[in-house]
Image (tube, helix red, strand yellow):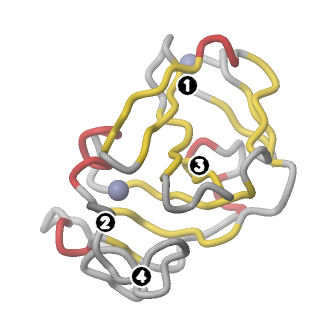
Amino acid sequence: MTGGCLCGTVRYRLASAPFDAGWCHCRTCQLNSGAPAMAFASVRDGDWVAESGSDSIRTVQSSNFGHRGFCAKCGTPLYMKVDHQPETVDFSVATLDDPNAIAPEFHIFWSDRIAWFEESQPLPRHDKFRPDTRGLKGTEPPA
Ligand SMILES: [Zn+2]
Ligand SMILES: [Zn+2]
């Protein structure tokens, strides 16, 4: 699978099949995207491969447990890395050339959702992280 940013500077490919696709409604995702929620999926760390524009990717520390990469020229959010899951990287599903290739299967941080967000098909809803989130013991974000 391949994808890229709005301006076309950053182009990437996935070196393995993505998994764990889901919606995140946390406040950080809302502000980072300017949208009510973001859809992410995971690949093994290193399998989100920038094929062009890697020198235009900037990162921002978005929480005390993670950072996000984005295109410095157009602002498109590209990926997120969280400290409790060093073995994977989460990328923005909407940046795939074919965003229909993988569909979200759950909601996290449902408790932060904007009230007018409506989904076409009800999915499992978790107020914070999922109980079985890799790298976490419970459902709370790392302190
Ligand atoms: Zn761009
Ligand atoms: Zn989020």
Q: Is residue 28 left or right of residue 13?
A: left
Q: Please name the amino acid that badge 4 sits on.
A: Lys
**Quarter of the rendering containing residue 142:** bottom left
Determine the residue located farthest toward the right in the rendered image: 15
From mark 2 to mark 1, how far is it between C-alphas? 30 Å
Q: Which residue is mark 4?
A: 137
**Residue depicted at 66% across the width and 11% down the height:** 55
**Upstream in sequence: badge 4 or badge 3:** 3
Q: Which residue is mark 2?
A: 141
Q: Which residue is mark 3?
A: 91
> x and y percent of residue 143 in the render?
26, 61
Q: Secondary structure at mark 3?
A: strand
Depth order, front residue of 93/86:
86
**Residue depicted at 82% across the width and 25% down the height:** 51
From mark 4 to mark 3, how far is it between C-alphas? 23 Å
Q: Secondary structure at mark 2?
A: loop
Tell whether circle 1 marks a residue whose Cβ is less than 8 angstroms from ligand 1: yes
From mark 3 to mark 2, how far is it between C-alphas? 19 Å
